[in-house]
Image: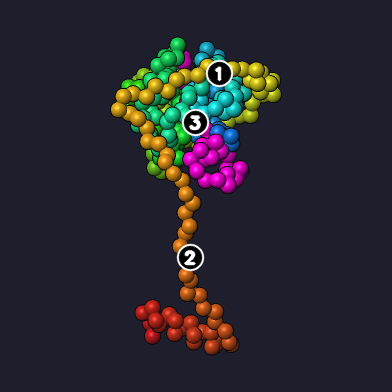
Amino acid sequence: MNVLVLVSGTADPKWPLPPRLDAEALEAHARRCAVLSPFDEAALELALKLRDADLSVHITAVVAADEGLARQAANLRLDAVYRFDERRLGPWSARAFAMALAAALGQLDRSADLVLAGREFGDLDDGSVPPLLARAMGLPCVSLALSVAADADGLWVTRQRGPFMERQRLAGPTLLAVTNDTHNRLRHPLLKNVMAARKLRFAPLAAAIADGEQPISLGAVQAYTPAPREGACRMLTGAPAEQAEALAQVLAGFGGPQ
């Protein structure tokens, strides 16, 4: 079975924003401080669990970020890691991003039996890239996937649906939009695998933008100055009885009982 994991990463919140807030500085910050998001980690862990159960499982990762994040994925001893050059695309243009990524995935030499992606695939909590990508790839999409397992009947996925859990059998190749859970936390990589990943070079996948699908570009960024908050705060003074009387008068002004 061939499993394809799509990784987008996120900016590490432990690092402060750059002092100069413009498009170029923010994009550079996101690349310099990129880490695996909780949803990237969940997708990777599901793939690793499938390989734990069946050593014939082949895991390919496509990382839509720079080489540093690709190396974080390679630390897990995946079978193949590619980089998707997304610099011409913006995360706010989900349709153009999904179309370009689907075209780039066609360059892989293995067709995927299962595609795993974090439910927020680099689109800033929008969650629109996975279903749009599934449509572009001609695959069904299962959202909020928590786990996936194989048995004699094929693949089964457990997903969250409101307060309930659903278990579904996958009829064929499917894209799972994975959410994080206590049972799919990413394992720590072995030191020998981390050392081996330092020597790897990652083949790029070109982002081919279709005609008429030019992405929206970021023109300007400016800091927002919130309006000052005006609070009608009044400190009650005096003896307790006086404070109670003053409070009763205030409440009476709101239409309370006299």
Relative to 127, 233 lies left or right: right
Asked if residue 109 lies in the magenta stretch, the reply is no
Q: Nearer the viewer, residue 12 or 54?
A: 12
Q: Earlier in the sequence, mark 3 or mark 1?
A: 3
Determine whether the residue tagged by mark 1 lies in a helix, strand or loop. loop
Q: Residues within 10 Å of mark 3 (few under 14, many from 20)?
A: many
Residue interval drawn in magenta: 1-30
**What label does residue 8 carry, if any?**
3
Residue tagged by mark 1?
A: 202
Q: Nearer the viewer, mark 2 or mark 3?
A: 2
Q: Percent from the top left, x then y, of residue 80?
A: 54, 16
Asked if residue 25 lies in the magenta stretch, the reply is yes
**How far apart, in angstroms, are the residues tagged by discs 1 and 2?**
50 Å
Q: Earlier in the sequence, mark 2 or mark 3?
A: 3
**What label does residue 228 carry, if any?**
2
Q: Residue at x 47, y 74 (%)?
A: 232
The image quadrant where one finds the C terminus is: bottom left
Q: Percent from the top left, x then y, of residue 96?
A: 36, 30
Q: Residue at x 61, y 17 (%)?
A: 200
Q: Nearer the viewer, residue 203 or 81?
A: 203
The three-letter code of the residue at mark 1 reads Phe
Q: Earlier in the sequence, mark 1 or mark 2?
A: 1
**How far apart, in angstroms, are the residues tagged by discs 3 and 1?**
15 Å
